[in-house]
């Protein structure tokens, strides 16, 4: 016990009490005239105060006082006795003696006008401050709550919750809509939920700003702002606060750091860039490809190809890969090339009538020496991405894959591949196709329906030559078909062939190849140059106009150009 009387020490005590105002508790007990015996009711008051402050008492200061009846010396002694009586009781109920300080002032510190109330002991308990700063974390997401934030409640009496919402499943589980209050679609790079509850009820608004950290889900990019979540129609929708989200590099992770003055949901988000971004991924889905990535190659027009592992038998880094935008469709076969290969349009491009072709995309690969062509594995799937501004004139862009035939031409598939949509922001910049890794692709608009039907109207007669192969080409449409033998009076005519209707005979070229004679024979002619028998709707080829060749590869063709 410290027993003090000097006035200047009391002044120091008063200053300390003022500065410690938030961490003290005090009460008074009263005495009978000229008495220093502690009343039973006073003992009860002391017991109640001790129970209330259990575990937090740092010091107990006892100040004895007296009224102004009697001499100064007598009252000084009486006030000391009253303080001592209180001290003895405190000690008897378990208060540590070294925590008690005893002061007495006689009649000098008159507080009340009523003399009875001045016969008192004032007890001041200096308490440990149990309202501490609090840090709540979920991984790298966190909220720092400074003590006094929810005054008069203390942090220790509040239930805090922090949730880092960083997966699509978590967003769905929280019933969060990725739209703002106007219905504009958003994607986020971080979402955090914070709540403070007292006895199960929402705490009042904080009196100090909370320090929040939102963990990034993806790499930061410009354009993210801080959004506040609001309940609307049973879902959480978003309101833009206008505060830009700026990334802070932490020791273990990157975060967006803010002062926050509310509870509930907050997010760093931004509006989706385009209507084509219909991804359900709240964190944006796939972004535009990194043109410097190891698995990416692109053309001068920024047609981008992404190659999966194993699409080539060699590592992609060891290959020279070239992407050609064949805007003039030079890789397609004209009538002359179809004649030379001996094929029809249906043989190499069976869906020609369904496709309004815009261009071919040809991807080739060679070894580092540039000499050996390397074929891709068509059983694997690769991604072809075409800048959206390059296909703005197409209503329903599709890709048709093609395989290079052993003879050298591209044989296009009957299957079409439509866009891969709802991937994410990548769909804003590119039309994306996931297609077999054939290396040849035809881009165009698709229209459903069968090829236009053309009735047989004319007959081509080869006179003495029978069982020939007859190819008919239209130099205007570049379509070639194989003519079938004509039937007349229920009898197949081996020297006559049906020719479909056409607009202009000047556009029509026929190639007849015959192997029934000793040497192969061929004749190329425009229909308009042949003898035409109007009565029979028949074009006639003369045998003398046929040319002999050792092999049809030696044919010299010019009418088909």
Image (cartoon, rainbow, N blue to C red):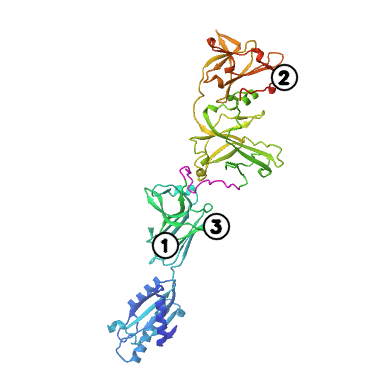
Q: Which residue matches tag 2?
A: 550
- Foreground of the two, 40 or 344: 344
- Foreground of the two, 48 or 140: 140
Name the mark on residue 22. none
Provide residue 359's location: percent of width, then percent of height.
56, 35
**Which residue: 45% across, 67% down?**
132
Mark 2 crowd level (few <14, some 14–19, many ≥20, 10 Å Cα)? few
Residue 289 magenta-drawn? yes
Mark 1 crowd level (few <14, some 14–19, many ≥20, 10 Å Cα)? some
Q: Main secondary structure of the magenta part?
A: loop
- Foreground of the two, 150 or 304: 304
Name the mark on residue 253. 3
Provide residue 209's location: percent of width, then percent of height.
42, 63
Quarter of the view holding residue 371: top right
Q: Earlier in the sequence, mark 1 or mark 2?
A: 1
374 vs 196, left or right, is: right
Viewport quadrant of the N terminus:
bottom left
Q: Secondary structure at mark 1?
A: loop
Vertical position of residue 297 compared to residue 340: above or below: below
Q: Earlier in the sequence, mark 1 or mark 3?
A: 1
Q: Which residue matches tag 1?
A: 158
Q: Earlier in the sequence, mark 3 or mark 2?
A: 3
Magenta segment: 274-292
């Amino acid at each position: 016990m410290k027993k003090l009387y000097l006035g200047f020490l009391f002044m120091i005590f008063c200053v300390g009490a003022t500065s410690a105002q938030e961490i003290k508790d005090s009460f008074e007990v009263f005495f009978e005239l000229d008495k220093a015996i502690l009343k039973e009711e006073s003992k009860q008051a002391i017991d109640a105060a001790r129970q209330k402050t259990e575990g937090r008492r740092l010091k107990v200061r006892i100040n004895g006082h007296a009224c102004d009846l009697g001499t100064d010396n007598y009252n000084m002694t009486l006030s000391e006795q009253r303080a001592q009586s209180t001290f003895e009781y405190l000690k008897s109920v378990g208060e540590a003696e070294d925590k008690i300080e005893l002061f007495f002032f006689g009649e000098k510190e008159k507080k009340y006008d009523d003399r009875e109330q001045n016969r008192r002991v004032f007890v001041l308990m200096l308490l440990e401050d149990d309202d501490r700063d609090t840090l709540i974390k979920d991984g790298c997401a966190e909220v720092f709550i400074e003590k006094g934030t929810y005054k008069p409640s203390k942090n220790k009496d509040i239930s805090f919750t922090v949730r880092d919402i960083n997966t699509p499943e978590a967003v769905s589980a929280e019933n969060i809509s990725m739209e703002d209050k106007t219905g504009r679609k958003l994607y986020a790079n971080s979402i955090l939920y914070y709540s403070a509850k007292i006895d199960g009820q929402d705490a009042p608004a904080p009196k100090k700003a909370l320090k929040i950290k939102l963990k990034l889900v993806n790499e930061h990019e410009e354009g993210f702002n801080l959004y506040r979540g609001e309940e609307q129609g049973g879902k959480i929708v978003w309101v833009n606060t206008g505060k830009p989200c700026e990334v802070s590099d932490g020791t273990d992770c990157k975060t967006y750091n803010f002062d926050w003055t509310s509870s509930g949901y907050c997010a760093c988000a931004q509006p989706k860039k385009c209507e084509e971004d219909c991804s359900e991924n709240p964190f944006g889905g796939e972004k535009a490809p990194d043109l410097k990535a190891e698995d990416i190659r692109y053309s001068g027009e920024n047609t981008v190809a992404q190659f999966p592992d194993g699409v080539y038998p060699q590592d992609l880094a060891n290959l020279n890969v070239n992407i050609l935008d064949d805007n003039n469709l030079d890789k397609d076969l004209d009538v002359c090339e179809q004649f030379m290969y001996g094929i029809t349009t249906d043989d190499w491009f069976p869906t020609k009538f369904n496709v309004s072709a815009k261009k071919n995309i040809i991807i080739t690969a060679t070894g580092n020496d540039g000499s050996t062509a390397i074929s891709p594995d068509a059983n694997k799937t690769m991604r072809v991405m075409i800048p959206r501004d390059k296909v703005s004139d197409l209503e329903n862009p599709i890709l048709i894959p093609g395989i290079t035939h052993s003879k050298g031409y591209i044989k296009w598939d009957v299957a079409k591949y439509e866009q891969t949509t709802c991937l994410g922001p990548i769909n804003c910049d590119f039309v994306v196709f996931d297609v077999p890794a054939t290396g040849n692709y035809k881009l165009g608009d698709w229209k459903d329906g069968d090829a236009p039907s053309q009735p047989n109207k004319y007959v081509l007669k080869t006179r003495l030559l029978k069982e020939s192969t007859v190819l008919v080409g239209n130099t205007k449409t570049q379509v070639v078909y194989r003519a079938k033998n004509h039937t007349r009076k229920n009898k197949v005519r081996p020297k006559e062939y049906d020719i479909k209707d056409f607009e202009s005979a000047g556009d029509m070229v026929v190639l007849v190849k015959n192997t029934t004679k000793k040497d192969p024979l061929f004749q190329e002619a425009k229909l308009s140059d042949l003898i035409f028998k109007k009565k029979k709707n028949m074009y006639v080829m003369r045998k003398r106009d046929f040319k002999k060749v050792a092999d049809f590869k030696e044919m010299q063709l010019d009418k088909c150009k």
